[in-house]
Amino acid sequence: MLRKQMHQALTFILACLAVFFLSACNANNQRLLEEDLTFKRENGLEIIGTLYRPADIDPPWPGVLLLHMIYGQRQEWEGLARTLSQNGYAALAIDLRGHGETGGEMNWDLARQDISQVWQTFASRQEIKANSTAVIGASMGANMAVLLGADQPDIQALVLLSPGLNYYMVQTAEPLAAYGDRPVLIIASQEDGYAASSSEELLKVARGEALLEMYAGIGHGTAMLSNQPDLASLLLEWLHPILQSTP
């Protein structure tokens, strides 16, 4: 009887150790796949970001830069960033200046310069396919994504969640025209009046392949990702032939 109890106790202890070991390994693997990065600007400002890497695919990978909403932070993209990484993309979510862990004050002219430098550094990493990058932005981040696309001709695609023709004096019509014939995916929700009407106008401005997906009742910006579960799949389906087909 005593021997049986000792055997059961030993089995229990070994099982607990195995669970602990696997949990530790998974945590270590997660830390290796997700890394916080610092991008230093010439003026001393440090832009903080998190890089999400694919686990089972060898680099180089297509790269996706994620730009959050005003008063938001990079963690808003965590779910989509992990989905992207699980599907072969390296996803970089950053805190814009004056947001999250990035210092400074909100200044959209300077933020335009910030994200341009961040994208250049990101795209030049050895593990990233420099000729296969996209930018996804939400709300104000969508407007900033349009500016970045206009400034950087090597960006292959834009995804705009709830963009506006003019948010805080950051206008998008002329920059989207300057973006040229590269593809753009625009997503909005009908009840989100200004973003919805802006999205329809931007579709008219787009010069290349442009798709507008108009939903109903799913909110604004990154909230749409949680309110419409199949939205991430739509993004992947749209991005794949653009980024994954590049040698």
Image: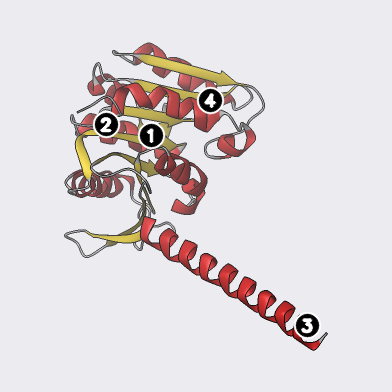
* Disc 1 element: helix
Of the pair 57 and 189, the residue shown nearer to us: 57
Which residue appears at 25% of the width and 44% of the height?
Answer: 59
Q: Which badge, 3 or 4, is on the more N-terminal residue?
A: 3
Does the image show residue 101? Answer: no
Numbered circles on residues, count: 4
Q: CA distance from mark 1 to mark 4?
A: 13 Å
Query: In this figure, which residue is indicated by the disc labeled 4?
Result: 188
Query: In this figure, which residue is indicated by the disc labeled 1?
Result: 143
- The 10 Å Cα crowd at callout 2, few under 14, some 14 to 19, many 20 or more, is many
Examine the rendered structure and indicate whether residue 95 appears above or below residue 203.
below
Query: In this figure, which residue is indicated by the disc labeled 2?
Result: 149
Q: Which badge, 2 or 3, is on the more N-terminal residue?
A: 3
Q: Which badge, 3 or 1, is on the more N-terminal residue?
A: 3
Q: Which badge, 4 or 2, is on the more N-terminal residue?
A: 2
Question: Disc 3 marks which amino acid?
Answer: Gln
Please say if the residues under marks 3 and 1 sit with CB atoms less than 8 Å apart.
no
Of the pair 27 and 95, the residue shown nearer to us: 27
Q: Marks 3 and 1: which is nearer the front? A: 3
Mark number, residue 84: none
Of the pair 199 and 154, the residue shown nearer to us: 154
Question: Disc 2 marks which amino acid?
Answer: Gly
Examine the rendered structure and indicate whether residue 193 appears above or below residue 128.
above
- The 10 Å Cα crowd at callout 3, few under 14, some 14 to 19, many 20 or more, is few
